[in-house]
Image (cartoon, rainbow, N blue to C red):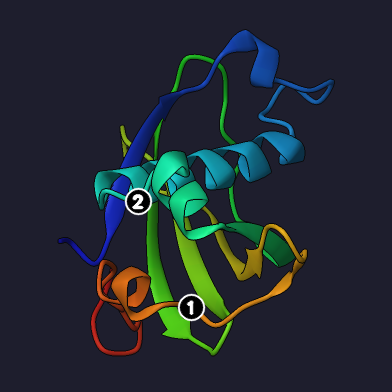
Amino acid sequence: MAAIYEHAVSVASADIDMQGHVNNLVYLRWMQDAAVAHSVAENWGKRRYEELGCGWVVRAHSIEYLSPAFEGEEVVIKTWLSEYFTASVLRQYEICRVSDGRTLAKAETKWVLIDMAKRTPRRIPDEILNAFQLFRQDEASV
């Protein structure tokens, strides 16, 4: 289990907005895709959550855009969990251009685990917590 998961994407023409760079909503999609891929990589895909009767919902996103990305570029979304709470986790992201390593954006999402039948937050089971290693950026450089 690696604390930091890396998810690679190629910037497609459909990702580009009227300013000629990647649209801000695409960054959100990349973040969602990276989070799901990280969960699947740790053997926590949709079916496993369904078996427990739970699923994740977003409470809040925060994105700081630092530099634009353009069509044809290769980008990597680094993601990790930085903090656990009773029914939620804080997931961090660093989005970088592969060619020069430049950080394009830094972001975080607060994910809340919900009981799918009741549609209310529920305590995160130990079996989920134990599948993901926490990484604190203040302890080391990404």
Residue ranking furthest to the top: 13
Provide residue 78's location: percent of width, then percent of height: 37, 53
Compared to 6, does 113 lie above or below?
Answer: below
Q: Which structural element holds mark 2?
A: loop
Query: At 35% across and 69% down in the image, what residue appears?
Result: 128
Residue 8 makes an appearance in the image: yes
In the shown orientation, is residue 53 left or right of residue 19? left
Compared to 90, does 56 lie above or below?
Answer: above
Residue that numbered label 1 is attached to? 124
User: Distance between the Cα atoms at labels 1 and 2?
Assistant: 13 Å
Taking depth in this image into account, of 13 and 81 the one nearest to the observer is 81
Crowding at dot 1, Cα within 10 Å, few <14 / some 14-19 / many 20+, comes out as: some
What number is the disc on residue 108?
Answer: none
Crowding at dot 2, Cα within 10 Å, few <14 / some 14-19 / many 20+, comes out as: some
Query: At 68% across and 12% down in the image, what residue appears?
Result: 14
Identity, as a three-letter code, of the amino acid under mark 2: Trp
Provide residue 91's location: percent of width, then percent of height: 50, 68
Compared to 109, does 67 lie above or below?
Answer: above
Q: In which quarter of the image is the C terminus?
A: bottom left
Does label 1 or label 2 sit earlier along the sequence?
Answer: 2
Compared to 123, does 7 lie above or below?
Answer: above
Residue that numbered label 2 is attached to? 44
Provide residue 102's location: percent of width, then percent of height: 40, 48
Residue ranking furthest to the left: 1
In the shown orientation, is residue 80 left or right of residue 18? left
Tell me the quarter of the picture where residue 99 sits.
top left
Taking depth in this image into account, of 18 and 40 the one nearest to the observer is 40
